[in-house]
Image: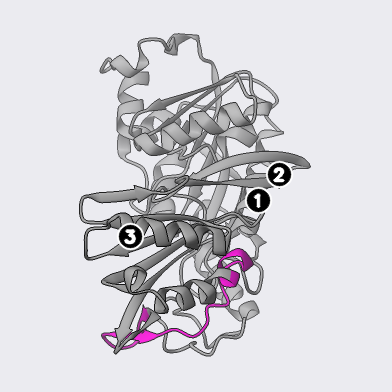
Amino acid sequence: MKCKHFGTCGSCSVYELSYKEELEAKNKRVLELLSPFDVKELEVFSSLDSHYRARAEFKIWHEGDKAFYAMSRLKEKGAFSLEECPKVIKPIESRMQPLLNKINSSKVLKERLFAVEFLATTTNECLITMIYHRKLDSNWEVEAKELESLLFARVIGRSRKQKVVLSSEFVTEKLFIDRQEYLFRHYESSFTQPNPSVNIQMIEWAIKQVKRVHSGDFLESYCGLGNFTIPLSKYFNRVLATEISKRSIHAAKENSILNMLRNIEFVRLSSEEMTQALNKEREFRRLKDVDLDSYNFSTVLVDPPRAGLDSDTIGLISNIQNIIYISCNPETLARDLVELSKTHNIKESAIFDQFPHTHHIESGVFLTKKN
């Protein structure tokens, strides 16, 4: 990717290496962390060279009567005005300048605007959130509605204790995964995978692992909006998926209906609460209609935050035959594998480059229980 802001923009911290060199460095880093567990090679899933990011947030910088997109600087404090961002997908890129032009031609849209967030899909749907340091009134709503028509997008306005949804607060992504079409509603301010092409590769890697299993029920913690749950559900009898976010569980249930699936039970529980429930340490009203004893889990998928898994969850999943561990932090993955490797062997391992031109890397391991 070529970008005039490399070395200045804090969004891309790795800019001096070629992409091939960057991937090699990430591969080496993760391999060193996993080598104590007899991992000798990683499957590497690369990103598109440019136009790969479906989420983006920009500050709005005001100078005189003009507004500019802005980002934090990489090597010093402060922000700079942004002229381009070739990492965003085309549905975002194509709307950025027309949106800025409209902002600069409208006092109502520009006044005390301090940030803009984009959420887009590969099928050209786009949600734009405009964030203000002032209360939004009917005049703003009129002009923002015109903006929706101009940009063929959905616009949301936010200020302190105020959220104005003009038409809809989600976009619907359509992904072709393992030769099948899936639909996902992505809501504003909810977590979504940022890199659609790598996300597909990541899900298909997980599908490749579960195809070895062929039976039983599936348990998932940190399921989000059903990103993994929904495509993997077809390979199991029944699925129990948990997530702490109310918004994500709401979206996951909608996505299950969109994809006409009936074998998934989505429940709002944290990983710790899920462990307590399955270990019969605590009862939850949210599980009153779920017969936990009827499940026969052959496989579990965990996709925890950077902090990794808590010790009780590690203890729980250590009793399940197959484990898929998706990690956004290879250091905590390696830490958790110290315990998991006592009961399981790593059969497959991979890295997924969701965030090119940064030090961040997603990784995954598939483990099976020792005989």
Residue ID at (40%, 57%): 142
Q: Is residue 5 left or right of residue 52?
A: left
Image coords of residue 221 (percent x, y): 44, 34
The N terminus - image quarter: bottom right
Location of residue 282 with respect to 242 vertically, above or below? above
Residue ID at (66%, 68%): 48
Location of residue 30 with respect to 205 vertically, above or below? below
Evaluate whether residue 322 shows in this view.
Answer: no
Provide the residue designation for mark 2. 177
Q: Is residue 118 left or right of residue 351?
A: left
Magenta stretch bounds: 71-94
Element type at mark 1: helix
Residue 139, numbered label: 3
Amino acid carrying mark 3 in the image: Asn
Element type at mark 2: strand
Tag 3 or tag 1, which sits nearer the N-term? 3
Give yes or no for contact between labels 1 and 3 (Cβ–Cβ under 8 Å): no
Element type at mark 3: helix
Amino acid carrying mark 1 in the image: Ile
Front position in the image: 6 or 312: 6
Q: Is residue 71 left or right of residue 21?
A: left
Label 1, label 3: how far apart the Cα atoms are: 42 Å
Alpha-carbon neighbours of circle 3 within 10 Å: few (<14), some, or many (≥20)? few
Alpha-carbon neighbours of circle 1 within 10 Å: few (<14), some, or many (≥20)? some
Image coords of residue 319 (percent x, y): 46, 26
Front position in the image: 63 or 195: 63
Residue ID at (38%, 80%): 70
